[in-house]
Image: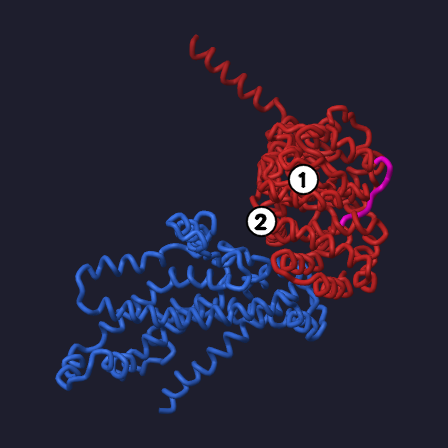
Chain colours: A red, B blue
Amino acid sequence: MRYCSALAVLATSTFLATAGPAPATELEVTHWWTSGGEAAAVAEFAKAFDATGNHWVDGAIAGSGSTARPIMISRITGGDPMGATQFNHGRQAEELVQAGLMRDLTDLATKEKWTEVIRPKSLLDSCTLDGKIYCVPVNIHSWQWLWLSNKAFETAGVPIPKNWDEFVAAAPALEKAGIVPFAQGGQAWQVNNTFAVLMLAIGGKDLFQKVYGDKDDTVAAGPEVAKVFKAADDARRLSKSANVQEWNQATAMVINGKAGGQIMGDWAQGEFQLAGKVAGTDYTCLPGLGINPTLATGGDAFYFPLQKDEAKAKAQEVLASTLLDPKTQVAFNLKKGSVPVRGDVDLNAANDCMKKGIDILGKGDIVSWTDQLVSQDTQKQFEDLFSEFFATAMTTEDAQERFAKIVATAD
Amino acid sequence: MPQQKRPIRLLRNLNAKIAAVPMMLTATFVFAGGSLWTVLYSFTSSKLLPRFSFVGAEQYERLWAAPRWNVAVENLFIYGALSLIFQFVIGFLLAALLDQKIRFEDTFRTIFLYPFALSFVVTGLVWQWILNPDFGVQSVVRSLGWTNFEFNPLYDADIVIFGILIAALWQGTGLIMCLMLAGLRGIDEDIWKASRVDGIPTWKTYLFIVIPMMRPVFITTLVIIASGIVRVYDLVVAQTGGGPGIASEVPAKYVYDYMFHAQNLGQGFAASTMMLLSVAVVVVPWAYLEFGRRRHG
């Protein structure tokens, strides 16, 4: 009798197992979100995807995007594609799509009306090639922020600057108090973007578009861009004693009041939040460096490499719609410090800085960022130039001449 | 009994020949084939994926106009020349000193060879810390009282390549010493006795008798050092990441960055073809002298 009941239990459990939801499909997702705030944000995606009965296998690759992307690309071209992978949308994955290595998501997009919910439209345009949609934008990131440490300016006894010029003017007081005025990470992608941010803030939207969008080399060699180089020269001078490489180390200097400010994208806000700092009281953010509140709508997107396995292909679809789910969008973006790609979600929980950003996006003061405008090849040449410029005493004239040369051959 | 057939030449040492087939195939198809393919595609405008769209020497023109490539080539020359000289001189001196029948020779040999057991990445990180102005040599000397002491090679664009050279010497010299020591031990004891009988000073014996006799060892050493110089990459990545700015870039890093970061295979291939060419310029005349002469002589 005892054996019988045991058998019955066994039978039921087997039955339950087969009757339950289909066995979890494992999907490996690669990304380069490894700093504290980023990891907390990506955990939200993993949680939401696991809740659908599938399993998120985290494939985080440490280092920045420039370390991670070659690994991702070689896996996809080498015939070992992951379930899904992060890229900055724009032209980073362009050729992979052209080579037919990425999955076409157009059907799902029409079913879920992505074209209606995703705003601004340029995000989905960057995912589109020949009328077909190949990626899911998950957030809007903008680079054009100057983060200021309120504590640092209090220590130095000067008011918190309201724009870049005031910031440069306040620098001597900070230096006197033993504070590094400007925290600039030394990595090439950071210095390159700092320059592009200065271009948009100081030169304005039109100049930015002419240089990076139209690749007009006479403008790039002209007097307006010379002004931008003067500002870059200031940035170089003020960051002389920073001696940091990673962006989050530079952000940490601002958080601890060891540095006055940093130009970095809004993902820096994730770090401030993780450290328990409050926007407005502990730190101040100046979109567009306080001069030109225009934001670029870059960001991250997920691409889905073609899979042979039917179950995995199904799971990819589930993941794609999970990423865009209103609830997941809010949970993820609040932790990440970025703005959701959907206009129809509730963002009461957003903080001071994020609201400023949403406001600017709502007004439509937006441009496409360099990742969308120029190829990776051109970006690399800019990076080489600016990492040299920021580390040496290269004159602004020489730098501008070389900058214009790169613009002339840019694609 | 019929006369046995003469063995066919091709079938002699058949086992050894069969065993060598995989390596022969690898050498032909992977090494030679891969090199040819790379050279061919360096004349195309391939971006992320190889595509046969011929553009002539455009990639090379761009390569030699790029400031970063020129810095990299210059660095390789400085690094190469100095590391060749110093590894030979220090390696030989250490070996000669160890050869004086000293006590604890095994211990010293182990100590000198130990750095070689570490990878370039570990070596690079260790020396990054040692040369860091806030933690390393500079701060130690300053804390001893010399407060104006300045030794900061890794953050000074003019001398950063020497900071890398120090690490490379620390890592590689032990191996060179061992090779030299083996060479010294291979010299017949009678030669030393003869030179002593003739009253030749020790240093002269080394310079005019022993060193010329060690020619094969020197050539092996030269090949090992030279191949290490051309492919230097990981040490730079670990120690400076090419910085400050682009001051410590090397050609191998340019190749990697342009192939994978910039998604411009054509440019990367052009740079790697130049590296191949530079190796060929060194190796071909040497191989000709070394093997060509033996055949005729």
Question: Foreground: B146 or A307?
Answer: B146
Q: Which residue position holds label 1?
A: A313
User: Residue A241 — which label?
Assistant: 2
- Tag 1 and tag 2, C-beta contact below 8 Å: no
Left or right of A211 in this view: B177? left
Say above or below: A229 vs A29: below
Residue A79 seen in this snapshot: no
Question: Foreground: A76 or A158?
Answer: A158
Residue A366 on the magenta segment: yes
Helix, strand or loop for disc 1 = helix
Count of numbered badges drawn on the protein: 2
Residue A146, quarter of the rendered image: top right
In the image, which residues are magenta?
A: A362-369
**Image depth: mark 1 or mark 2 in front:** 2
Residue at 31% over, 82% down: B5
Look at the image and tell me in which quarter the C terminus of chain B lies. bottom left
Question: Foreground: A204 or A239?
Answer: A239
Residue at 79% over, 61% down: A220
- Image coordinates of residue B211 in percent, x first then y, are 29, 79
Q: Chain of mark 2?
A: A
